[in-house]
């Protein structure tokens, strides 16, 4: 069972990078199942039904999200789409699903999205406790977690906490790919961050000029995406049977 996990597709250049590299990567690695983090895929951030349908038609199986899950006015309808999952630890009163389960031949794959609490702004529940709660009820053959978090310490702690209980824990959110893809002692595949898909030159996808200005002046501004840049495409290939995690980092 090979799973391709593509990291945060960021705005217009993210979609452009996906269009340019997706089929090439898909043909080369031949995954059985494809997960995309789509929390920043639109100009508005968040995910739209239109993009969801387009990407599903190309072979994407599940969209995970993150802190931008609620950025669009139509977020409730989007979270109701069958293969969209938002971070489970926003809790039971929030729109959307805490996990999705999909049949693949005779196997069931569960995809969970969790969000970190360190250096993150939303008052979410404890992701460790939420993971325990979900793992008690999920009966799937394979379980994949997208852990959308800022701090590598929190990511590693969750990874070791769940080692041997899930098949893979894949970090997203920082938009910077890490080189620490490993198989943990009890067999769980792990990487701190897959990295983003979009502008290569930018401040984690945002405008260079604006990003510098914000840090110099301290004046908050809504992030503007970088408009012109060569591209990057970042993903990991998970081989759940042979226990391998391989990085796919394309930098133009
Ligand atoms: Fe993101
Ligand atoms: Fe994020």
Image (tube, rainbow, N blue to C red):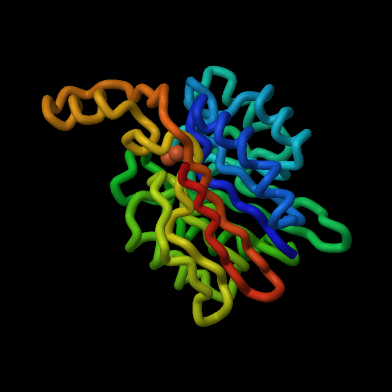
Q: Which residue is drawn at 49% across and 21% down?
A: 43
Residue 139 can be seen, yes or no: no
Residue furthest to the left in view is 217
Q: In this view, does 61 lie to the left or right of 68?
A: right
Viewer-nearest residue: 107 or 248: 248
Q: In which quarter of the image is ligand 2?
A: top left
Please say if 69 is above or below 225.
below
Please say if 29 is above or below 156.
above
Question: Where's residue 152, x and y in %?
Answer: 35, 59
Q: Which residue is drawn at 49% across and 71% down?
A: 182
Residue furthest to the right in view is 106
Residue furthest to the front in view is 252
Question: Where's residue 136, x and y in %?
Answer: 63, 65
Please say if 61 is above or below 15.
below
Viewer-nearest residue: 152 or 197: 197
Viewer-nearest residue: 106 or 203: 203
Question: Where's residue 83, x and y in %?
Answer: 71, 40
Q: In which quarter of the image is the N terminus?
A: bottom right
Q: In which quarter of the image is residue 105?
A: bottom right
Residue 73 can be seen, yes or no: yes
Q: Residue at x 51, y 81 (%)?
A: 185
Please say if 73 is above or below 33.
above
Q: Quadrant of residue 199?
A: top left
Q: Is residue 48 left or right of residue 215?
A: right
Total numbered badges shown on the rendered structure: 0
């Amino acid at each position: 069972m090979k799973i391709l996990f593509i990291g945060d597709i960021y705005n217009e250049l993210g979609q452009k990078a996906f269009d340019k590299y997706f089929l090439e990567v898909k043909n080369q690695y031949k995954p059985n199942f494809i997960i995309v983090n789509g929390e920043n895929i639109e100009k508005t951030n968040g995910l739209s039904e239109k993009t969801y349908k387009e990407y599903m038609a190309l072979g994407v199986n599940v969209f995970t999200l993150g802190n931008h899950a609620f950025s669009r006015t139509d977020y409730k309808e989007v979270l109701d789409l069958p293969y969209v999952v938002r971070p489970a630890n926003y809790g039971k009163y929030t729109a959307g699903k805490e996990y999705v389960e999909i049949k693949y031949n005779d196997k069931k794959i569960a995809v969970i999205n969790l969000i970190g609490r360190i250096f993150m702004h939303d008052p979410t529940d404890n992701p460790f406790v939420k993971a325990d709660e979900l793992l008690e009820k999920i009966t799937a053959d394979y379980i994949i977690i997208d852990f959308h978090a800022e701090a590598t310490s929190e990511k590693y702690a969750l990874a070791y906490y769940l080692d041997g209980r899930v098949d893979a824990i894949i970090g997203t959110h920082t938009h910077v790919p890490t080189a620490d893809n490993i198989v943990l002692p009890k067999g769980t595949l792990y990487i701190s961050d897959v990295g983003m898909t979009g502008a290569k030159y930018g401040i984690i996808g945002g405008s260079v000029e604006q990003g510098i200005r914000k840090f110099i002046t301290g004046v908050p501004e809504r992030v503007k995406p970088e408009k012109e840049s060569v591209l990057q495409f970042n993903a990991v290939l998970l081989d759940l049977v042979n226990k391998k995690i391989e990085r796919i980092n394309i930098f133009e």
